[in-house]
Amino acid sequence: MTALDERGVRADRADHATVWSALGTVRDPELDEPLTDLGFVACCEVSEAGHAVIRLRLPTYFCAPNFAFLMVADAYDAVAGVPGLTGLDIRLDDHFASDVINRGVAARQGFVASFEGEAVDELDSLRYDFVRKAVLAGTDRVCRTLAGTGLDPASLTLGEVPPGPDVERLRARRRELGLPAEDGDPLLLDPATGQAVAPADAKRHLAFARLTRTSMEANSGVCRGMLRARYSLTTEEEGTG
Amino acid sequence: MYEKDGEKYFVVDAHTHFWDASPGNWVKGQEEYAKGWIECFHAYQGLGPKETHWPIDRFQKYSEELMMHDLFEVGHVDTAIFQPTNLRQWYKNGFNTTEADAALAEKHPGKFLVNTTFDPREGDEGLKALEERVKRYGCKGVKLYTAEWRGDSRGWSLKDPEAARFLEKCEELGVKNVHIHKGPTIWPLDKDAFDVSDVDHVATDFQGLNFIVEHVGLPRIEDFCFMATQERNVYAGLAVVVGGLMHARPKFFAKVMGELMFWLGEDKLIFGADYAIWEPKWQVEGFVDWNMPDDDELSDFAPLTVDQKKKILGLNAARLYDIDVPAELKLADPKDVEPVGVPNP
């Protein structure tokens, strides 16, 4: 018997919506934004039989291969986990290391094995550094919303922050690093140590959080602009599938 | 010199190139990289205003006349500083070499300063060649690429003992401005080529040298700013900041300028147009017209004054390179200003 979901689609087969939403969970590690929002998914087709063909693209031919590898591997993992997927063909196009990355990801090799002789370290610490930065940037995002509320970020716990997507995203990033993320935990903490920030240091901590967010967002702005120039996109086309 | 609203700005373009990336200069077997590299640069040009975009063939190789026109006839530049990029592994005669830059500079006395480069992996021979180039071309600065692949080596660090020998030589020769490319690079593949900790190290050891971090460490502005607050001889090269953000992403341009003013301050920011990626004209004119927008998110940042813009567009670089500035273009009463973000003692 074949089950139909609420949209009348066979639930035992992956479809475009489920695959697209899996791709939406994959972030550019450096920008902390979903590939689907950045316009990095050039093509996503899922056949009726549940076979997915995905093509990824990046803003330049020379985008750092370490980040490119992380993204393609993460995208592979995310989509491979979609229930009802019967086949997966995922490739990065138009990049100087496309072939090496595509082969390495398809063979489930790590970064070092894929780039034999050209790399000695896996990318875990790089990824960790960027989640740490995402925590700082997320802290600024949350604290900006507190302006004018009379609440002092230095003395707040996460549970005392008015609820919203920004604080949820901050909690998620903190959990990824194993940092405290429950209601009673402080809003401001040092992402390297997990220790609460002392009130006397709060001003500088917040200035640094703001700076980190500016850096990531400016970088994201450059990447989006480059992608648009490279593929002659309009703003509306960036996030389409 | 650029004049607007009765104010006169002395303009030093501290980051310019005269390159040849045309197919005739591509190394056999490396065409894909040579082509990819210049197309990547060309895409960056897309971040500038549409009317300043060039067709790819002109962008691959432009004439001397065009460069003189774009910088000095219409671009308001008083002095331009060449920053070489050899890339001989992809381009037969190099991409933008000290020699090619110097040949152009010699034809136009007083317009250009020629920087050179070094690679500490070249050892004694490289040290000798550096000295010869510096003496021959009168270099007061070097441009360094620490992430450059060479034989089995996957890049180098300013912390290497060999690098210290070259920096000592620079001090001895009066080459006091060290520009370091911290921005998009390719190799080594697994390293974070944007890591600025080696600049931190040598800035402490070589107090007599100025370290100008090109492209402000984009995309790691936060690491760069944090480091710069601790080292008085570290500067921000604004190539890419103005060209890549001011037109395409004005809001982020405002934020980045705000942060740089906050953490480094008005005496440490050095304008560079990064020609031929972007022409100086629209950047100089746009920067003089620009100011910090009135926006809640930018409330930590003050508007820039005319004097601050004069420093950034030319007077700071003139100070580092001992460039003569006509009396009428100097500031009446220049002061060194401490940035807000420097930690209290």
Image (tube, coloured by chain):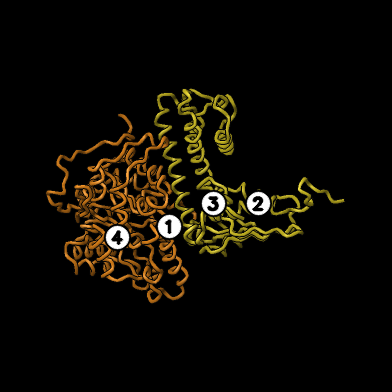
Crowding at label 4, few (<14), some or many (≥20) Cα neighbours within 10 Å? many
Residue that mark 1 sits on = B185
Total numbered labels: 4
**Residue closer to the observer: B247 or B278:** B247
Q: Nearer the viewer, mark 1 or mark 3?
A: 3
Residue that mark 2 sits on = A20
Q: Position of residue A120 (x, y in %)?
A: 51, 55
Dot 1 and dot 2 residues touching (CB under 8 Å): no
Q: On screen, B169 above or below A153?
A: below
Marks 1, 3 in one chain: no
Q: Residue at x 51, y 24 (%)?
A: A156
Q: Residue at x 36, y 42 (%)?
A: B225
Secondary structure found at label 1: loop
Secondary structure found at label 3: helix
- Tell me the colour chain A is drawn in: yellow
Residue that mark 4 sits on = B16
Secondary structure found at label 4: strand
Q: Position of residue B9 (x, y in %)?
A: 21, 50
**Residue closer to the observer: B317 or B246:** B246
Q: Nearer the viewer, mark 2 or mark 4?
A: 2
Q: Identify residue type, mark 1.
A: Thr
Is B70 placed left or right of A121 in the picture? left
Chain that is orange in the image: B
